[in-house]
Amino acid sequence: MRERLTLPSPAKLNLMLHILGRRADGYHELQTLFQFLDYGDEMTFAVRDDGVIQLHTEFADVPHDSNLIVKAAKKLQQQSGCTLGIDIWIDKILPMGGGIGGGSSNAATTLLGLNHLWQLGWDEDRLAALGLTLGADVPVFVRGHAAFAEGVGEKLTPVEPEEPWYVVLVPQVSVSTAEIFSDPLLTRNSSPIKVRPVPKGNSRNDCLPVVARRYPDVRNALNLLGKFTEAKLTGTGSCVFGGFPNKAEADKVSALLTETLTGFVAKGSNVSMLHRKLQSLL
Ligand SMILES: C[C@@](CO)(OP(=O)(O)O)[C@H](O)COP(=O)(O)OP(=O)(O)OC[C@H]1O[C@@H](n2ccc(N)nc2=O)[C@H](O)[C@@H]1O
Ligand SMILES: Nc1ncnc2c1ncn2[C@@H]1O[C@H](COP(=O)(O)OP(=O)(O)O)[C@@H](O)[C@H]1O
């Protein structure tokens, strides 16, 4: 039987997110801090000889060919000229449209997994450049290290923030990133942070006022978690998170809040669990 490979596809948090302005193409210039969670989907890959790319797990709202997993596999196959195909299964636990980057992470895990199985020998720069054509958040998942991101998220500088335990609340609404970025009330004039590492006190997310105004469930989650710690929004939401010094404290708060809200506890990590697994294969 052909080789099978099972790889993690972790979530990310935006520990801060400042919007500096809007470019001529409508995209926004950002400064944001990405950190991974030791929590995510699990993907299994098996090589096929006939060149077919088949995702076997069905997604309720995403047609097969629109799935970022399939798009990533097809682009890599086309651009590398590889004649092999792939069967893919995913155990999907990350909420979609939650600002924790599940789709982008799945795309990155696909690129790195296929690069390995198809023995393409592409380096990280090339995979990250292909990833950027799939979504602004794909490159950080390809590189696998916590990063300060600029531009539309593609200029990455590795950073080493603290790695607390997080309570992540998952309001049952999907937030459209495009909708938040086109809201006239969004502020787009934050001053660029020029000092490195980013000084403390810059943990604001400029999307929060607009998201909280539009989505009462997100507002509610921020208020509830805010009783225990600084409650923040990741990306354009909907997920809300707060850090705790250890697992026991995070578990205690989570137990109280998940009586009424969906959520989970996970450790922050500056090296993605995908990269830790790939490293162990070498
Ligand atoms: C802003 C972030 C922070 O992590 O939000 P989340 O999606 O994670 O919540 C991301 O960079 C999002 O990345 P991603 O979700 O890949 O966005 P894309 O598919 O590239 O863009 C979706 C839409 O959002 C808008 N968009 C996105 C990124 C950006 N820097 N400026 C924008 O204006 C554009 O209208 C674009 O059509
Ligand atoms: N493999 C995938 N996993 C999740 N979402 C996907 C996937 N492929 C395509 N999508 C689409 O991308 C959208 C954003 O997904 P996701 O990355 O999970 O959210 P966010 O960018 O808010 O973190 C989804 O609502 C879905 O329509």
Image (cartoon, grey):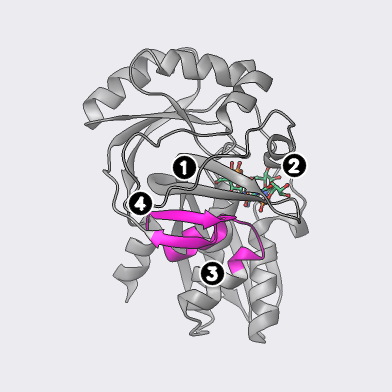
- For image coordinates 33% across by 72% down, the residue present is 281
Distance from disc 1 to disc 3, alpha carbons, whole Å, reads 19 Å
> Is the residue marked 1 within 8 Å of ligand 1, measured from its CB?
yes
Estimate the x, y position of residue 261 in percent, counting from the top left.
50, 18
- Mark 1 surroundings within 10 Å by alpha-carbon count, few (fewer than 14), some (14 through 19), many (20 or more): many
Look at the image and tell me in which quarter the C terminus lies: bottom left
Q: Which residue is mark 3?
A: 128
Distance from disc 3 to disc 2, alpha carbons, whole Å, reads 27 Å
Q: Is residue 10 left or right of residue 266?
A: right
Q: Quadrant of residue 251?
A: top left
Mark 2 and mark 1 lie on one chain; the one further toward the N terminus is 1
Q: Secondary structure at mark 1?
A: strand
- For image coordinates 33% across by 57% down, the residue present is 271
Q: Which residue is mark 2?
A: 61
Circles 3 and 2: CB atoms closer than 8 Å: no
Of residue 152 and residue 194, the one placed in the foreground of this image is: 194
Distance from disc 3 to disc 4, alpha carbons, whole Å, reads 26 Å
Kindly identify which numbered label has been placed on residue 269: none
The amino acid beneath tag 4 is Val
The amino acid beneath tag 3 is Ala
Mark 1 and mark 4 lie on one chain; the one further toward the N terminus is 1
Mark 3 and mark 2 lie on one chain; the one further toward the N terminus is 2
Q: Which residue is mark 4?
A: 195
The stretch in magenta equals 131-157
